[in-house]
Image (tube, rainbow, N blue to C red):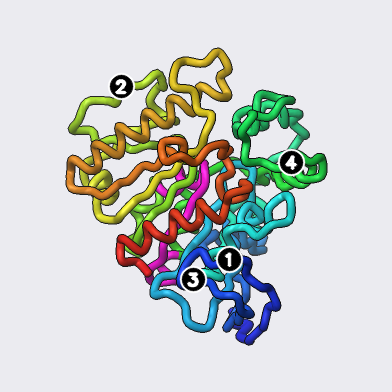
Amino acid sequence: MKKNSLSIVLLCMLFGSLSAQETNSSLIIKEQGSYFVGGSLTTNKNGSVFHGDHGYVYYQMPIHPHKLPIVLLHGIYQSSKTWESTPDGREGFQNIFLKKGFSVYNMTQPRRGNAGRTVECKNTEPVYDEQDWYTKWRIGIYPNYFENVQFPRDKESMNQFLRQITPDTGPLDFEINANAIAALFDKLEGAVLIAHSQGVMHAWKTIPKTKNIKALIGLEGGGFFSFPTDEPSPQTDAEEGIEYIRVQTDTFETFTKIPILLIYGDNIPTEHSSIPELDIWRIRLKLAKQWAATVNRRGGDVTIIHLPEKGIYGNTHFLMSDLNNKKIAEIIYQWLKTKKLL
């Protein structure tokens, strides 16, 4: 890979200081570029080769970065676009954390978006399911908005939001994806992972593969909560296999070695809901709390923040692009500070 090393002065004035890293001055980027990580190389019977199943990474580095970079990992049917500008044109986590002094590595998983080249292609027929995602992502109960929702209500913002959905180009393979994610962290020799939704599922598969994930911030994670086989199964309405799994003790112990912060938004039912797209979040939050208690009981360091319990209301599944995304980023920044990871 040939590095694109340059100094670019981005004339973006910061409005208000959320942390010591943010000032009303120009932002100077020391280096930016992109590359691929992981992947396979296969050869057919004629000797022709095929490179595929890699991840894609876009990165930016400030002049004086914090000691650990941040890796951003998207969720289901998303790409690195998740972390760029928001549907209504505000700054996303990619820029927010860059301005807070972090080198930021924005990753797209294999078989998705810029990393779409795969050895196992599948035909992608249109699936007319946007109303289901609208509700499952807790913008409201389609077509209505939740009264307190932190999502912009103009037509164009919704248009932009729905257009960032992107399909898999091949079957979802957590092993291939976790290997690519681990390859990035090993290349960086240590970084903090901020993952969203299905990206948190990938985190549970990746942490046992590398010692270079130094902390995890999981935004609205659901699925693959990994409980040790030497303890009883969690109390849950979910069946084992997707929402939670059982792992060997040595695998589970890897989750006790790093600090973990799990953040959940608003409008999650507290009792059983007849709307399955909403009820799944009740199940997931309950599982997250049981999992955190198990990890902490065995010497780990897991913190769960359910935002309404902190007086922060209206957040959707997409915390990083909600109207109060700078407040969410500051919560993460302060947590990293308390863990001495700056």
Q: Secondary structure at mark 2?
A: loop
Q: Amino acid at mark 4?
A: Leu
- How packed is label 1: few (under 14 Cα within 10 Å), some, or many (20 or more)? few
Ranked by sequence position, the earlier of labels 2 and 3 is 3
What numbered label is drawn on residue 162?
A: 4
Q: Secondary structure at mark 3?
A: loop
User: Which badge, 4 or 3, is on the more N-terminal residue?
Assistant: 3
Name the residue at 50% across, 38% down. Answer: 265
Q: Amino acid at mark 1?
A: Gly
Name the residue carrying label 1. Answer: 16
| Disc 2/disc 4 C-alpha distance (Å) | 35 Å
Residue 186 in magenta stretch: yes
Looking at the image, is mark 1 or mark 3 earlier in the sequence?
1
Which residue does the numbered mark 2 point to in the structure image?
235
In the rendered structure, does residue 18 fall within the stretch colored magenta? no
Q: Position of residue 156 (x, y in %)?
A: 81, 44
Quarter of image, res 228? top left
Q: Which residue is mark 3?
A: 102
- Residue appearing at x 61%, y 46% in the figure: 322
For marks 1 and 2, the one nearer the N-term is 1
- Residue 118 seen: no
Mark 2 vs 4: CB contact within 8 A: no
Viewer-closest of 216 and 179? 216
- Which dot, 1 or 2, sits closer to the camera? 1
Query: Which range is magenta?
Result: 185-203
- Is disc 4 in contact with disc 3, using a CB cutoff of under 8 Å? no
Q: Look at label 2 and name its amino acid.
A: Gln
